[in-house]
Amino acid sequence: MSQTPADLIITGCTVLAHDDQERIGFREDAAIVVRDGAVAAVTDAAEAVHVPAAERIDARGQVAMPGLVNCHTHAPMVALRGLAEDLPTEEWFNDVVWPVEVNLTEQDVALGARLACAEMIRGGVTCFADHYFDMDAVADVVAECGLRAHLGQAYFSSQGPQGREASLEFALRHRGGAGGRITTALAPHAPYTVTDDDLAATAALAHEHGLPVHLHAAENRDQAETSLARHGATPIEVMERTGLLGTELLIAHGTGILDRDLPVLERARGRIAVASAPRGYLKFAWPTTTPVRALRALGIPVGLATDGAASNNSLDVWESMALTALVQKSTEGDPRWLTSRQALHHATLQSAQAVGLGDRVGRIAPGLRADIVLVDLTGPHTQPVHDLAATLVHSARAADVTTTIVDGRVLMRDRELLTIDVPAVVEELAARLPALVDRGHGTRIQEYDA
């Protein structure tokens, strides 16, 4: 092994590894050597003892995992956590969320994003895909706090051409920002709020500028049936005829994907991925969930997500991983699907692929960026360990993450956040809440009728 000084060496840990068949395995008593923000080597702990390093972390009793990726969220919406409870989707949007979002200021977005990033760092998330408003503020927060992010400025057709143009300008302005930690996407809201002409124009812009697209589509079965009744096509078929399925496309939710949509997705020329956030679907009492098994049979990666905390109440991807495994077992009527190892695969490599970063993160391997989390399994709720994968998925919790590292930089060590002052954020946000949650104006940013 090279004796060139390392920036960081994590030693004595068990490393979650992917083999060349993309299967999950574990390497015990290992060391991870980090140089210039990337993994330089994964080796035996004994071999790393004499390698000089600027910083060392003794990780005995811990598992080193690729950082989790939250493939679809609205980070600033943590400011609305718990505001719209126990409501059907239409009332949730029209009576609470969209009236409140009329009040959003750039300051609100920045404060919400900062609190969300703190929550995600503490939960072992190293990258998130965000789709919201005033995204310049979110990009600034990402640059400050050290996370990796895939960002899109959301737009509705009701905004006129300016909405689409602003989404493009944001994507071009911030692409490659924060030292390469920020990637960007075009972000039409959904087929039910964006016209076919705007969707087609977005597809053309994606090809022209080499940008991916991130949108909500076929979120639930009602949307699919309404689209069929009104347009004679499902949301997936709408995306095909407007050219979006020929782009690099991240579809949020997809619980309304119908059997007739599967051959459409199979013949798609673009790189399609789906983000699944099962907690929200359970909360809204949607009758179906993301058809993970059918999508995987088509080779479509399914990444894990939380959606925004206004619907999910948390940004806990750890919980999304466990719920995905459980909901899929129940939906398929098959306890052998989804296994713990499959769930870990979705939470790591597939989630990285879903946001277009499978060549940079999602695995701990030489040459990839050093986005790593350490998980302490010494607690009584994780002992004894008979099956390490099952322990990680079904016994461990987000609070068991002790250390979070992005690009080789430690953002949290021994549960101490190093880049965000949470009490200061909470104090400032609390002062903003009365103005933010006021609905006395009687307006909303959009009408939900899907």
Image (cartoon, rainbow, N blue to C red):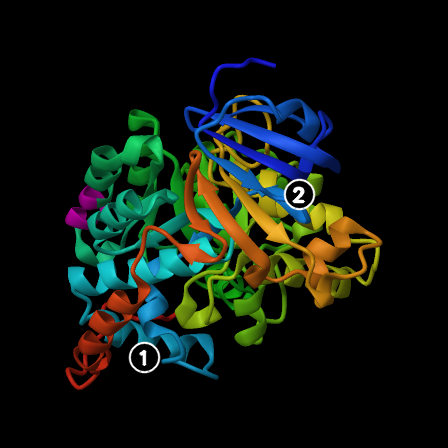
Residue 118, image quadrant = bottom left
Name the amino acid, label 2.
His
Q: Position of residue 299 (x, y in %)?
A: 65, 36
Please tell me whether the stretch drawn in magenta is mainly helix, strand or loop. helix
Horizontally, is 201 left or right of 240 in the view? left
Residue 283 marker = none
Q: Residue at x 24, y 36 (%)?
A: 174
Horizontally, is 238 left or right of 100 in the view? right
Q: Which residues are magenta?
A: 161-166
Classify mark 1: helix, strand or loop.
Answer: helix
Q: Position of residue 314 (x, y in %)?
A: 47, 67
Vertical arrangement, residue 323 with respect to residue 430, above or below: above
Q: Residue at x 74, y 56 (%)?
A: 391
Q: Position of residue 224 (x, y in %)?
A: 52, 61
Circle 2 residue:
345
Q: Quadrant of the C terminus?
A: bottom left
Horizontally, is 327 left or right of 174 in the view? right
